[in-house]
Amino acid sequence: MSISVRNLCFSYPDHPVLKDLSFEAPDGVLVAVLGPNGVGKTTLLRCILGLENHYQGQIMVQGEDVKDLPARQLARRIAYIPQVHGNAFGYSVMDMVLMGTSPMMSPAAVPHQKQIDAAMTAMKSVGIENLKNRSFVHLSGGEQQLVLIARALAQNAKVLLMDEPTSSLDFGNQAMVLNQARSLARGGYTVLMSTHNPQHALWYADYALALEGGEVVGFGQTDKILDADLISRLYKMRVSMVSSRSGMLICPEESL
């Protein structure tokens, strides 16, 4: 298993967030983490990344306990792909992707041909090598998200964590990024992606992890567990499921 989480509990000083949370993500799958605002999706990612250490339970990544791994070793196993926001101080696409090679180098080193080759390979894998000399801030939102994915790939980690990667993108750019996430899973990466949109999970994810009140209320293959009852429970609204040539469609009906 690429990711194994057992009995994870985490609290901020003023309130508990995650409660006895357990799941295992197999190698080479896209897992969508679902649930309403404040349910603990981002906190879960932060715990797996080692950014929140004051938790109970165990998090294993590629057979190693996250708490036992120094930051540089953890970075060789997990790469984080954030939401697109703010600016990047005018960095070029090549500069942005090269930042992903930093776990391969000493802190004071400058990129050499090995790192440049790794950055080019990562850009080619997501089809943006033609953008390498462009300014990151002048790209579309979808292109920026692909640059962040390429930066993660240049890190050479096999587990990718994506925090709501389509939250600020238009419909076409959402499809472009989600198709890329699915393609990476098909290529052997394990991708854990938080999302506010259960439709994205149905169309693109292999597995769904449904959270309510900081607890797991559903986990398994998406087409087997993500039904109208579970979606209604998560988002407090009645929905129906309609079959189409593209897969199941979620149709809102009314609030509960």
Image (cartoon, rainbow, N blue to C red):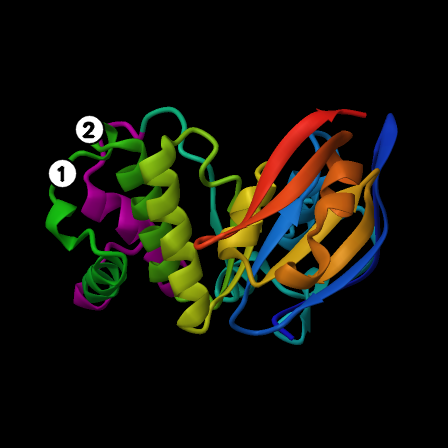
Q: Residue at x 24, y 59 (%)?
A: 119
Identify residue type, mark 1: Arg
Q: Which residue is mark 2?
A: 138
Alpha-carbon neighbours of circle 2 within 10 Å: few (<14), some, or many (≥20)?
A: few
Image position of 126 with respect to 229: above or below: below
- What distance separates the C-alpha of mark 1 from that of mark 2? 7 Å
Q: Which residue is mark 1?
A: 134
Image position of 186 with respect to 41: above or below: below
Magenta stretch contains residue 101: yes
- Examine the image and state in which quarter residue 1 appears: bottom right
Q: Position of residue 245 (x, y in %)?
A: 44, 55
- Examine the image and state in which quarter residue 43 appears: top right
Whether residue 251 is visible = yes
Alpha-carbon neighbours of circle 1 within 10 Å: few (<14), some, or many (≥20)?
A: some
Q: Are marks 1 and 2 in contact (CB under 8 Å)?
A: yes
Q: Nearer the viewer, residue 107 or 140?
A: 140
Identify residue type, mark 2: His
Image position of 202 with respect to 184: above or below: above
Q: Is residue 246 left or right of residue 74?
A: left
Q: Nearer the viewer, residue 249 or 145?
A: 249
Residue stretch in magenta: 88-114
Whether residue 106 is visible = no
Q: Residue at x 71, y 51 (%)?
A: 227
Label 1: state its secondary structure.
loop
Q: Residue at x 78, y 45 (%)?
A: 229
Image position of 24 with respect to 211: above or below: below
Q: Is residue 188 left or right of residue 252?
A: left
Q: Position of residue 51 (x, y in %)?
A: 64, 46
